[in-house]
Image (cartoon, rainbow, N blue to C red):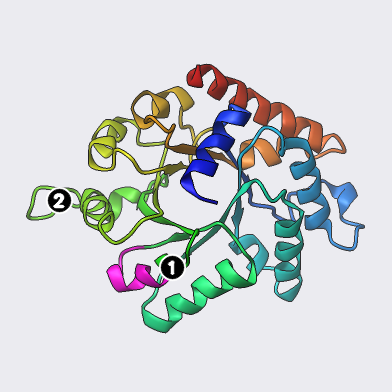
Amino acid sequence: MNRVELVNLIKQKQSFLSVGLDSDLTKIPKHLLSADDPVFEFNKGIIDATHDITPCYKINIAFYEAMGIKGWETLAKTLDYIPDNIFTIADAKRGDIGNTSKKYAEAFFKEFSFDSITVAPYMGRDSVEPFLEFSGKWVILLALTSNKGSQDFQFIKKPTGEHLYEEVLRISQTWGENIMYVIGATHPEEFKNIRSLVPNHFLLVPGVGAQGGSLEGVCKYGMNEDVGLLINSSRGIIYASDAEDFGDAARASALKLQQGMSMLLG
């Protein structure tokens, strides 16, 4: 999916919501556990309930890897079930050099046909470039994450006076096109500065909802002319209920965010 298609999809749905499918077998409704593939049945219910109000699904690969071969099968079925006109993110946080990154890219872009993948950039340019070789695919670089540990390294001051995350933003945008950045909603005070560094790039923003981030706080400085945001919510949507009404509850939670986004889009 190219930039124009993504922007048009956001405007059509009046939504820049990313629904995170961090689907944990230990947390899904118990009535699904008797199914042949409980996690897939859960994902189907979430997708059926939300696909018309979200332009994006972010699949957290760790939850599927943890189930072994069965998990990879569930991942493939889930990806196939998502409508073709919805942007998909492999939240895999990969990052290595040379042929290793190339094989990661082939796995998620060719074998699974995701539109994008999250990548850790801290091994440098040659760990990211193999992902950028795939036409029409996006690389989403971790820049400023939403977790408490982001303070440990990402805010280290470089000799240039920049924080490490700022240098990542400044340097990496020269590596190629189709780059987005992960910027946590728990750092709303940083968005004005971030937009001065990457005014035109899309930002994937986790941390709204369960982690305490504010939609309005992010959008105040985070939006650009093309919206430029994908606001992710995982737990707050998919675990809104652990009963048979989980799909309806997920939709209600997603709809609340989508309606707020629609107002901000005008």
Q: At which x and y percent is residue 251? A: 73, 31
Please indicate whether residue 39 sits to the left or right of residue 134 in the image. right
Say which residue appears at 40% left-offset and 36% top-offset.
186
Asked whether residue 139 is drawn in magenta, I would say: no
Q: Quadrant of residue 177?
A: bottom left
Element marked by disc 2:
loop
> Magenta residues?
121-130
Q: Secondary structure at mark 1?
A: helix
Residue found at the very far right of the displayed protein: 34
Q: Amino acid at mark 1?
A: Phe
Q: Where in the figure is residue 36, as x and y percent of width and height?
A: 90, 63
Would you name the residue on which mark 1 appears? 131
Q: CA gap, disc 2 to disc 1?
A: 28 Å
Which residue does the image show at 54% across and 74% down from the upper left? 106
Q: Residue at x 56, y 57 (%)?
A: 115
Placement of 85 over or under 210, stated as above or below: below
111 to the left or right of 150: right
Q: Is 75 above or below relative to 84?
A: below
Q: Amino acid at mark 2?
A: Lys
